[in-house]
Image (cartoon, rainbow, N blue to C red):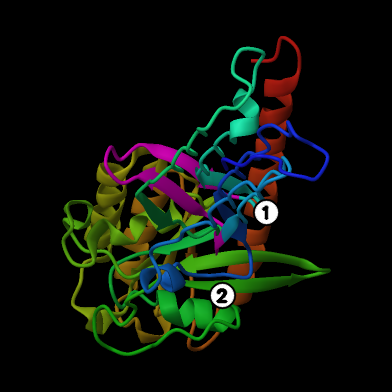
Amino acid sequence: MTAFRREKYVPRGGPSGGDGGRGGDVWLEADRSLNTLLHLRYNPEHVAENGRHGEGSNRTGRDGADVVVRVPVGTQVFDAETGELLCDLAEHGARFLAARGGRGGYGNAHFASSTNRAPRYHQEGSPGEERELQLELKLLADVGLVGFPNAGKSTLIATISAARPKIADYPFTTLEPHLGVVDLGDFRTFVVADIPGLIEGAHEGAGLGDRFLRHIERTRLLLHLVDISSFSGRDPVRDYEVINRELAEYSGDLANKPQIVVATKVDALDEPERLERLRTRVLADGRDFHAISAVAGSGVAELVRVVGRKLDEIRALDELREAAEVRPGGA
């Protein structure tokens, strides 16, 4: 603001233009009450309020209000131009400064000096930051379900939790990830993520491909479901090997996660040797093996208990590892 003090009995009031307020910031904040980024698809642009201009009598303008954009926990923020990962909002309440507001300009009173007692100019404020960001959501779950289409993943998650995914007898019934909370009793729970079925070449984008594999990258444990039924027309050992190969091609970390292999649909098994061949192959890899029928309920309760114990072991190991890292001299 350029202004001068003009009052009765004050013949030389001098410059009195106040400074402008700074512009508001745009923040991203993780909120556990949100599950998707759909609300940003239809409202992709967010602008914070401008700072108000200064006024006479050396009054500084009000700062612009910040804008807080809520996103689900597990959202990753990338620079849309460079692809650089800027932030990973993995905890409720975590914040990221997406765009900083501009600085307010100086009023003419700021430039008054002994040699320039009546400056007739002011400084304009600087523009705020403008950024284009790409947001990706990775679900936060303890257990991830993987396997070919129609391996029984949706049926299992519907059996052990309150999740109600679509279930049908054709491939790719599941088109988006689903989360289910499993109750272990004594106020203990774990979260299961069901992603669309994988097929050979998934890491290169075949089928629904790698669009959803990122959702199980943060899980602690994988449940690898293999359809063992006689009418499936598939080789269970080959299915097991193909899925593990796709996981390894997509991410070495994903392939090295603890994995429990689950033979499903044993109620429709007429050839016991199919089950034994898969069991022998899985045990040779040093992995746990279980056979269940989610429809009939056989083996499901025992599987849930095993998963609960395995998660407890993994959490204990993670805590020991973290303690070793923070301990002086720890490796």
Q: Residue at x 28, y 56 (%)?
A: 243
Main SS of the magenta part reads: strand
Q: Start and end of the magenta stretch?
A: 69-90
State whether residue 133 is above or below residue 237.
above
Outermost residue on the top side: it is: 329
Residue 156 part of the magenta segment: no
Quadrant the N terminus occupies:
top right
Q: Picture quarter containing residue 187?
A: bottom right
Q: Residue at x 65, y 48 (%)?
A: 55
Labels 1 and 2 touching (C-beta < 8 A): no
Q: Amino acid at mark 2?
A: Gly
| Label 2: few (<14), some (14–19) or many (≥20) C-alpha neighbours in 10 Å | some
Q: Amino acid at mark 1?
A: Gly
Horizontal arrangement in the rendering, residue 107 relative to residue 232 (left or right): right
Q: Nearer the viewer, residue 69 or 72?
A: 69
Q: Which residue is mark 2?
A: 299
- Mark 1 sits on what residue? 93
